[in-house]
Image (cartoon, rainbow, N blue to C red):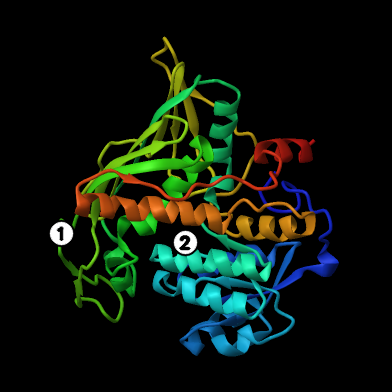
Amino acid sequence: MVLRLPEHIRTQGVTPMNKMKAGIIGCGNISGIYFKNLKESPLVEVVACADLVPERAQERADEFNIANVYSVEELLAQPEIELIVNLTIPASHANVDIAALEWGKHVYSEKPLAITLEEGLRVLNLADKKGLRAGCAPDTFLGSTVQTAKAAIDSGLIGRPIAATAFNMGLGPEAWHLNPEFFYAPGGGPMMDMGPYYLAAMVELLGPARRVSASAGIQIPDRTVGSGPNSGKPITVKTPTHLAGTVDFENGSILTMITSFDIFGGSGLPWMEIYGTHGTLNLTDPNYFNGDVKLSRMGSEEWELLKPVFECGKNERGLGINDMVEAIADNRDHRANARMAYHILEIMQSFQQSSLEGRHVVLQSTYRFGKLPAPLQTEMINNSI
C-alpha cells in the first residue's frame, strides 16, 4: 500500500467531486514534489500558482498542467481558491500566511512557521480570529518511520522513554543550491532548516518540551556559492551554523541534539535514537517518510528490524495538507498543525537564546491536540484491512 490518500486516512465528507481548490505561492526547488503529490490527491485540486519570478510559476504550470498563473496578489484575490500552500522562503512564510488568512483562506506553509515568535503568534491568533485552519510542514512525522516508532513506544516495547539523541551533521547547501544565501540569513541555518524534521518527530514521539539549554556559533564564516549562475559568489553568514544542546520534555525525557552545516565527512552518529527503561529505538533520517526502525531490547546486543505499521513512499510531502482538508470536513484537529509548528519554533529559537544568555530557557508554549484524531497507525492499519 502506498501512503497516499484515500487509502491511509479516512475521507469522510470530502470526495473527488468536491475537492478543495488550492493555490501554490512559491515555485522554487521544493515546489515540484508538492505539485506532483497534490496532483494525485482526491482531496485537493491545485488550480493556480504564483511566484515573485513569473517565469518560474509558468514553468511549474506548464510542467504540471496548472490552469492559472497569477501574481501573488491576484492569486489571493481569487474567490474560488479556499487554500493557500505557502512555499516561499522562510523570511516570507508569516507574511504570506497572514495575507492568505486576511483573504479568508486556509493556509499550509513550508517550515518553519516563521522566523520570529512574534510573527508565528500573529499567524496563530489570526487563524483563530478568522475561524480558519493554519498548517505547517514538516509532515514527515506522518510517515512510516516515526509512526512505527510511535507504535513501538505506545505498546511498551522500550518501557518508559527516558532520553533521546538527534544528530544532523553535514555541510550546508551552498555546493548544490542555486540561491543558498537565505540559508545563512536570520531564519536560516541548520536548526531552522533541518531542525523541524527532528523536533517534529520528537514531539510526536515524546510529547511537548519544557526547557532548552544550548551553545551555538558560526564556526565556518566564509562560504561560497558552488553552482549555477552565481557560482563563486561569497556568502555572508549571519546565523549560527553549529548548534548543540539539550531539550527537556514534559514527560521527563532528555534529548541531546546537534545540528550543523560545518561537518566535513561522515560523523558516524545515529540520525535519531529513543532510549527507554527496557530498550532502544534507532530511526533513520527524519527528512524522509519511510526508513528502518530498529529495536534493541534490554539484555540483547542485537538490533531487531521492526515491521512498518504501514508502507509509504520516500517523499510523500503534502500528507499534512490532505489531513488538514479532511480534518476540516471531520471537524477535528489536523496533525501538521501551526500550533505544533509554533512550539517547535520556540524550541529552535531557544537554542540560540540559551547560548547568548548562558542559561536554561523555559518554554512558554506547549502543544497538545484539541479534538484528538485517532492514532495514525491505527487508522492506517484499519483502512488497509
Residue drawn 40% across the image and 47% down it: 363
CB atoms at circles 1 and 2 under 8 Å apart? no
Which label number is shown at residue 220? 1
Mark 1 or mark 2, earlier in chain: 2
Dividing the image into 4 quarters, which one contains the C terminus? top right
Location of residue 37 by image quarter: bottom right
Q: What residue do we see at 39% from left, 50% from top?
A: 347
Residue tagged 2: 111
Report the Cα–Cα distance between label 1 and label 2. Answer: 24 Å
Side of 67 relative to 89 (left or right): right
Please tell me in which quadrant of the rendered image residue 359 appears. Answer: top left
The relative height of residue 345 versus residue 294 in the rendered view (above or below) is below
Q: Residue furthest top?
A: 299
Question: Which disc is residue 290 wearing?
Answer: none
Query: Which residue type carries mark 2?
Result: Lys
Front residue of 131/230: it is 131
Horizontal relation, residue 103 to residue 175: left or right: right
Examine the rendered structure and indicate whether residue 371 appears above or below residue 50: above
Q: Is residue 63 visible?
A: no
Q: Residue 12 location, x and y as percent?
A: 83, 53
Residue 287 x, y percent position in the rendering: 45, 50
* Residue 201, placed above or below residue 322: above
Q: Residue 65: percent from the left, percent from the top?
A: 66, 79
Tell me which corner region of the image, top left, top right, bottom left or bottom right, holds residue 236.
bottom left
Q: Amino acid at mark 1?
A: Ile
Mark 2 falls on what kind of element?
loop
Regarding mark 1 in the picture, which secondary structure is present there? loop
Q: Residue at the spot x=54%, y=55% of the render? A: 339
Above-or-below relation of 181 to 357: below
Q: Is residue 49 among the parts visible in the rendering? A: yes
